[in-house]
Amino acid sequence: KTEGVLMNNRFVVESLREVVPDDMEMGDVDLLRFALAYPDDKVGAEKALKNAIQWRKTTGKMIVDAANEAVAKATANGGWENEVVRDAAPHADIINDFITPKAVITTSTEDGDLVYVIRASQIDDKKLMDKASV
């Protein structure tokens, strides 16, 4: 479970928290991702985190802002409205023709986290890539 993994990596997660700027929100699980990607390499984890922070503030800012706005709208009524998030995704006008309700399964973990599974066998990936690729 997440709690156990967090406990086992708490010192690295706490160290990574010091890298996060005050104006950015990142939870323990966000930081855990970097700790697990670089086991026994605190410097590598910090470098990856700094790169991610830089991307979120520059190149990826538009995507991050759109995602935050979509999640806020999707949860505004106390539940989860997935269509709001699907429609706000980058290139949704192309991708949503292929990633249809038939091609996904939405479920949750024992802890209540949302899991959105895309069934690749239900997608015409060649047509998708022909239409979406630059």
Image (cartoon, grey):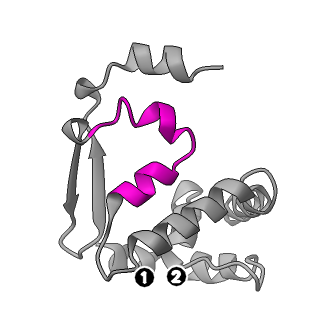
| Residue ID at (29%, 29%) | 120
Magenta residues, start to end: 83-100
Q: Which of 47 and 80 is in front in this view?
A: 80
Q: Nearer the viewer, residue 122 or 14?
A: 122
Position of residue 103 measured from the top left corner of the image (x, y, whole percent): 24, 36
Residue 45 pos. (x, y %)? 67, 61
Disc 1 to disc 2: CB gap under 8 Å = yes
Depth order, front residue of 121/67: 67
Q: Is residue 96 magenta?
A: yes
The residue under label 2 is 10
For the residue pair 78 and 46, the one nearer the viewer reads as 78
Q: Where is residue 59 in the image (x, y as percent from the top left)?
A: 78, 50
Residue labelled with disc 1: 7
Q: In which quarter of the image is the C terminus?
A: top right
- Number of numbered labels in the structure image: 2
Question: Where on the picture, by quarter, is residue 64?
Answer: bottom right
Q: Distance between the residues labelled 1 and 2?
A: 5 Å
**Which quadrant does the N terminus fall into?**
bottom left
Q: Which residue is drawn at 23% across and 25% down?
A: 121
Q: What type is the residue that disc 2 sits on?
A: Arg
Q: Residue at x 23, y 76 (%)?
A: 111
Secondary element at tag 1: helix
Q: In which quarter of the image is residue 13?
A: bottom right
Residue 16 colored in magenta in the image: no
